[in-house]
Image (cartoon, grey):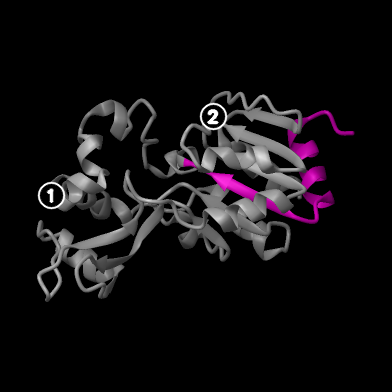
Amino acid sequence: MPNDPISRCVELILQSKNTVVLTGAGISTNAGIPDFRGPQGLYTSRLYDAEKVFDIAYFLKDPKPFYEFAHDFIAIESKILPTPTHLALAHLEGAGKIKAVITQNIDGLHQKSGSQKILDMHGNFLTSHCLRCRKAYDYHELKSMVLQHVIPHCSCRGIIKPDIVFFGEDVKYYHQALELAQSADLFFVIGTSCVVYPAASLPQFVPGKIVIVNNSKIDLNMYNVILEIESDIDVFFKGVMDAL
């Protein structure tokens, strides 16, 4: 059995018949998107009031705080590129070594990287809907309105809301994600501290081996965590891809 983490990780990937990946904000920090709970994140910097930005009840009353945040995000979105880890996961999926990526992120970088089977439990900005008539809008339509500092409204005068999950709303694809976790013989936890539920509950349903790769230590207290990497995520996955 290899002693160094990269060789051990490669061995596990090659042996696996059913690998599933769970990702969080830490996978995107090297792309220039601060972890919401990190030192420069939304919840610590107080640049925005998180209680207003992502609360569905507040959004229905006053969508302005959310769209102030959305303007700043959309303004830099085109400059944000997938990290080496995003690209590695897409490559491994294309090679038949990853069955699916479950993500808590709303940044769309897994889609940009070329991953196909993505369960974005918190949604994303790629599609939007009118809350009154349910008319669908694509990302470019929303972007055009937001960058003009206009709160997007439909022709029926209803508010347009991106298909992201706010506090007070149910997450997407939970049952599918749970089924994937329950069938995984290898489960990666990448860039998430596993504190946001229900996504954080998924590892406990995994019958197979669990590998954690994160910038800081996570303590899942689970017997089947057989490899825990505390390092720069991109450096580690560059090493894995070179070894493969």
Q: Quadrant of the N terminus?
A: top right
For residue 3, which numbered disc appears in the image? none
Q: Of the residues shown, which amino acid type is indicated by label 1?
A: Lys
80 or 39, which is in the foreground?
39
Image coordinates of residue 109 in percent, x first then y, are 45, 55
- Residue that mark 2 sits on: 215
Seen in the picture, residue 220 relative to 51 is either above or below; the reply is: above
Q: Of the residues shown, which amino acid type is indicated by label 2?
A: Asn
Q: Which residues are magenta?
A: 1-24
Q: Is residue 14 visible?
A: yes
Q: Earlier in the sequence, mark 1 or mark 2?
A: 1
Image coordinates of residue 78 in percent, x first then y, are 32, 58
The reply to whether the magenta stretch includes residue 28 is no
Q: Is residue 88 visible?
A: no
Image coordinates of residue 205 in percent, x first then y, are 67, 42
- Residue that mark 1 sits on: 61
- How crowded pointer 1 is (Cα within 10 Å; few <14, some 14-19, many 20+) is rated as few
62 or 3, which is in the foreground?
62
Residue 208's quadrant in the figure? top right
Seen in the picture, residue 98 relative to 132 is either above or below; the reply is: above
Q: Secondary structure at mark 1?
A: helix
